[in-house]
Image (tube, rainbow, N blue to C red):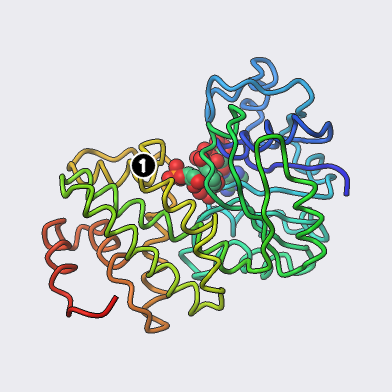
Amino acid sequence: MTGVAVLGAGAFGTALAISLSAVRNDVVLWARAKDQIAKMSLDRTNAKRLPNCHLPANLKLTSDLQRACAADIILISTPMQKLSEFAQENRTLLAGKILVSCCKGVDLETGQGPVELLERIVPDARIAILSGPSFAIDIAEGLPTALTIASKDEALVSDLQATLATNNIRLYSSLDPIGVEFGGALKNVMAIACGIAIGAGLGESARAALMTRGNIEMQRLASALGAHPKTLSGLSGFGDLVLTCTSTKSRNFSHGIKLGRGEPIDPSITVEGVATAHAAAKLAAQRGVDMPITNVVRDILNSSITINEAVELLLSRPLKRE
Ligand SMILES: NC(=O)C1=CN([C@@H]2O[C@H](COP(=O)(O)OP(=O)(O)OC[C@H]3O[C@@H](n4cnc5c(N)ncnc54)[C@H](OP(=O)(O)O)[C@@H]3O)[C@@H](O)[C@H]2O)C=CC1
Ligand SMILES: O=C(CO)COP(=O)(O)O
């Protein structure tokens, strides 16, 4: 396999392109805005999305999607709610390629995760997902982490594991893309819940309880959708849950903190858990899956309940065996 393109020069796409460029000379990073690419080429940094991180000299930059899509392997790193539109608009360029989704979310309109969505829109592509604990800034600075690459196609996943591992990203493989995509998506909802708890002064014990019961909810929904429950105990589940529920580097956790403190929200920041809370609550209702934490996060986001009411709701549920 030759040539790796990263589509979407957001924080994560840029970080992945930097990390991959340390081990390969055939990496191209695409952004839709010509002026952004011109500025990035001049400054060798992405001031808009990942400031202060150097773009290596061997990393190619382009706003020409056709040129980027000449690569065999295409990593897609747009926000989840933009993936459907992006894939539909560019389905001809993506056809027949190896597509690796880097998105963490559930599509609000269809209830699909990124793998299922790409399989529907680009049926003749070979699809995989990359997920796990990885703040863009950590990856860009060369700090080590471990991620999961998953696909139902065993040969593909093993090729991608070898091709996409870098000096600071250790890659584990998985044949359970549903578990990996829903682990990565649902942890964002729990990070908002934990942020709310911390922001509202409910304490760290409350956060630990939310993380633990949240993890059970994540497993329940993912299993109902066909995932292996054990997958959610891995990097794209427990691993990312721990990271994002405990760090203010997380936009989802920070969003929750702001809600908990009653502070204003900046709508320009990508906070995947907001739409995903709505999508996941809907999926759970359709399948009869009990998701009390997800439901209260959705209701707080809708302003249909207060944080105090959410606490009361969670604590007054019938007592049960763990
Ligand atoms: N940031 C992180 O630490 C991590 C993020 N992720 C996941 O990666 C995905 C992207 O996040 P992140 O990079 O942080 O997001 P950012 O908000 O930093 O960037 C989003 C990028 O997507 C581009 N974009 C938005 N809409 C479209 C569209 N319709 N067509 C093409 N490009 C589009 C934006 O372009 P423009 O600037 O022109 O608007 C921008 O380059 C999310 O699903 C996130 O959960 C995963 C792991 C870590
Ligand atoms: O997914 C992430 C780290 O693994 C990034 O989390 P946020 O989107 O909450 O910043």
x and y percent of residue 222 in the render? 49, 72
- In front of the other: 243 or 266: 243
The secondary structure type at the circle numbered 1 is: loop
Residue corresponding to mark 1: 267
Q: Is residue 24 visible?
A: yes
Query: Residue at horizontal 44%, vertical 61%?
Result: 186
| 176 relative position to 229: left or right | right
Q: Is residue 270 visible?
A: no
- In front of the other: 163 or 15: 163
What type is the residue that disc 1 sits on? Answer: Pro
x and y percent of residue 308 in the render? 11, 58
x and y percent of residue 310 in the render? 17, 62
Tell me the quarter of the picture where residue 119 sits: bottom right
Query: Residue at horizontal 54%, vertical 19%?
Result: 52
Q: Is residue 223 above or below residue 150?
A: below
| Total marks placed | 1
Label 1, residues with CA under 10 Å away: few <14, some 14-19, many ≥20: few
Tell me the quarter of the picture where residue 169 sits: top right
Furthest toward the right, the residue is 1
Query: Residue at horizontal 20%, vertical 46%?
Result: 260
Q: Is residue 236 above or below residue 51?
A: below
x and y percent of residue 2 in the render? 88, 45
- In front of the other: 118 or 162: 162
Furthest toward the top, the residue is 43
Furthest toward the front, the residue is 321
Confirm if mark 1 falls within 8 A of ligand 1.
Answer: no
Q: Quadrant of the C terminus?
A: bottom left
